[in-house]
Image (tube, helix red, strand yellow):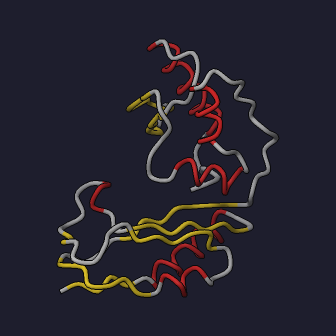
């Protein structure tokens, strides 16, 4: 979700210090941070873009194409960050299917027609067997929404997610 409700400046400084400590000087990092009572704690750092549609969310929230920047850096071209064009709020809501064999996904078209919904995508084809949600790879799809505020983006994504139905037996 964007914007964060946490102390962003402190988290950014913790991420910079962690990247510096492991020798990452150029290119993207994916950094997980837990906000503890006494400040941010780096949990994970990898020299890559984040998964879970992080790059798409950044573009929706700020107008920054992280994929293009990462590719430019990888090919030795200047990776110039353009001026930020912030939205009021943006978020990804992951979809979870009930356990069973997938027969159909309904409601995607209706979800995409809602105001502020930027994307709605199921991940799995018919005949996929869903089990319990235990890891990110068990997700069934996602909805991405933008709004005039974080709360509005979250509400729009939730409404869209409610419209998507995974028909399983």
Q: Is residue 49 above or below residue 124?
A: above
Q: How many marks?
A: 0
Q: Is residue 106 above or below residue 44?
A: below
Left or right, 115 with respect to 163, comes to right
Residue lying furthest front: 75
The residue that appears at 57% across and 61% down in the rendered structure is: 91
Q: Is residue 123 above or below residue 62?
A: below
> Where's residue 15, x and y in %?
53, 27
The residue that appears at 65% across and 35% down in the rendered structure is: 69
Quadrant showing the N terminus: bottom right
Is 73 in front, or is 134? 73
Is 66 in front, or is 35? 66
> Where's residue 34, x and y in %?
43, 38
> Where's residue 149, x and y in %?
70, 65
Residue 22 in view, yes or no: yes
Left or right, 105 with respect to 28, comes to left
Residue 36 in view, yes or no: no
The residue that appears at 44% across and 30% down in the rendered structure is: 41
Q: State which quadrant residue 73 falls in.
A: top right
Q: State which quadrant residue 101 falls in.
A: bottom left
The residue that appears at 58% across and 19% down in the rendered structure is: 26
> Where's residue 169, x and y in %?
17, 86
Left or right, 61 with respect to 132, comes to right
């Amino acid at each position: 979700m964007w914007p964060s409700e946490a102390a962003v400046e402190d988290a950014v400084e913790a991420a910079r210090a962690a990247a510096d400590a492991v020798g990452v000087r150029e290119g993207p990092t994916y950094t997980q941070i837990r906000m503890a009572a006494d400040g941010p704690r780096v949990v994970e750092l990898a020299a890559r873009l984040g998964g879970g549609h992080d790059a798409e969310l950044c573009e929706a929230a700020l107008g920054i194409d992280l994929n293009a920047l990462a590719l430019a850096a990888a090919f030795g071209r200047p990776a110039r960050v353009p001026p930020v064009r912030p939205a009021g709020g943006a978020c990804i809501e992951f979809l979870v299917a009930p356990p069973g064999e997938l027969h159909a996904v309904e409601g995607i078209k209706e979800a995409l027609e809602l105001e502020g919904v930027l994307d709605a995508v199921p991940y799995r084809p018919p005949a996929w067997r869903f089990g319990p949600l235990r890891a990110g790879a068990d997700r069934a799809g996602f909805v991405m929404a933008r709004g005039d505020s974080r709360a509005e983006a979250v509400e729009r994504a939730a409404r869209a997610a409610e419209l998507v139905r995974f028909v399983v037996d």
